Image (spheres, rainbow, N blue to C red):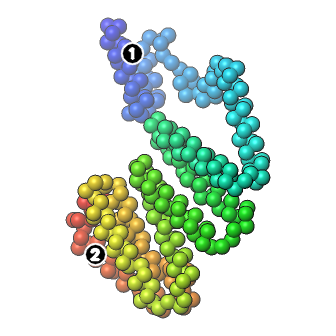
Amino acid sequence: MNQDRRQIIVKEIDHWRRSKLLPDQYCDFLLNLYAEQDAIPTTKEQHHTVGKAIAAVQRATGMQWLLTFGTFTLISFVVLYFNEFHPLLQMAVVSLAVVLFLRIGQRLRRRNEAAGLAITSTGMLLLLGGGLYMLNLHEIDHWGWKTGLVAFCSLFWVVYGITARISMLHLCGWLAAILVYAWLLSQFMIDPKWYEVQLYWLPIACLFGWSSWFFNRWSKAVSAVLFVTCSLVWFMPELYSVMFVDEAIWLQLQLIIKIAVGGGLLFSMRKKWMVWVV
């Protein structure tokens, strides 16, 4: 076979391997047919992570070793003496760590979506966990501070989820906002009636439903998240009654009616809402 044609076929097989269009064993079989034996990379050479790590260590320069151990020492110092820092410095450290995680996750998503999302999620959890830890460290026990922190995290998750096109993070932001709203209602509502609980939640569900229709012309992903949030808020009065109301009257009947009404609305408007979210 012509050498140039052989090289084109080998490159195409290699592209199939990287794109996961064919299993590795099929690609190895095709390479054994078309490639020269000296040019066939072994599976161990391509996929052996330990071997790559050892090779990287062997090629590392003295400056790289110094930076690696310096970074590790700095992280250890921050972890060990974090409680002794000034509150402003603690906030700066947590904020810097969150920014680094988000930046690394954003760059890593271009090569590996799952790994990038994992790093981004770690940064978001660090934002919430670090804030709660500092409140506990400084004995700030008032519920308003914790509620404000969760509200800030929910707003940040919604904004970042939309801009970075991470639908799950966007949805988690709205879920956190719903929890904040439910907690505020539990603090200020005393012995609410069943219809009052419905009135506090159903208009919000309608607002999310309208927003899903409104935003579908610009972003299907945002519209889908708002539609899912609308569906969850629709049943929040019953969940709120279970968690915060001592004597929930006709709760099972309310839930059955809500399921029937919601199912009827979805069926009657199926040609519209399916366009918003698909």
Residue at image location 28% in from the left, 77% down from the top: 264
Q: What residue type is labelled 2?
A: Leu
Q: Horizontal placement of 230 versus 61: left or right? A: left
Question: In the picture shown, does residue 154 fall above or below 104?
Answer: below
What quarter of the picture does the N terminus occupy?
Answer: top left
Q: Which of 192 and 58 is in front in this view?
A: 192
> Which circle marks residue 34 in the picture?
1
Question: Sequence order check: which comes first, mark 2 or mark 1?
Answer: 1
Q: Residues within 10 Å of mark 1 (few under 14, many from 20)?
A: some
Q: What residue type is labelled 1?
A: Tyr
Q: Position of residue 215 (x, y in %)?
A: 30, 60
Q: Where is residue 54 in the image (x, y as percent from the top left)?
A: 66, 24
Q: Badge 2 is on which residue?
A: 265
Label 2: which secondary element = helix
What quarter of the picture does the C terminus occupy?
Answer: bottom left
Q: Horizontal placement of 78 versus 230: left or right? A: right
Q: Which of marks 2 and 1 is in front?
A: 2
Residue at image location 46% in from the left, 81% down from the top: 238
Q: Which of 9 and 119 is in front in this view?
A: 119
Label 1: which secondary element = helix
The image quadrant that residue 216 belongs to is bottom left
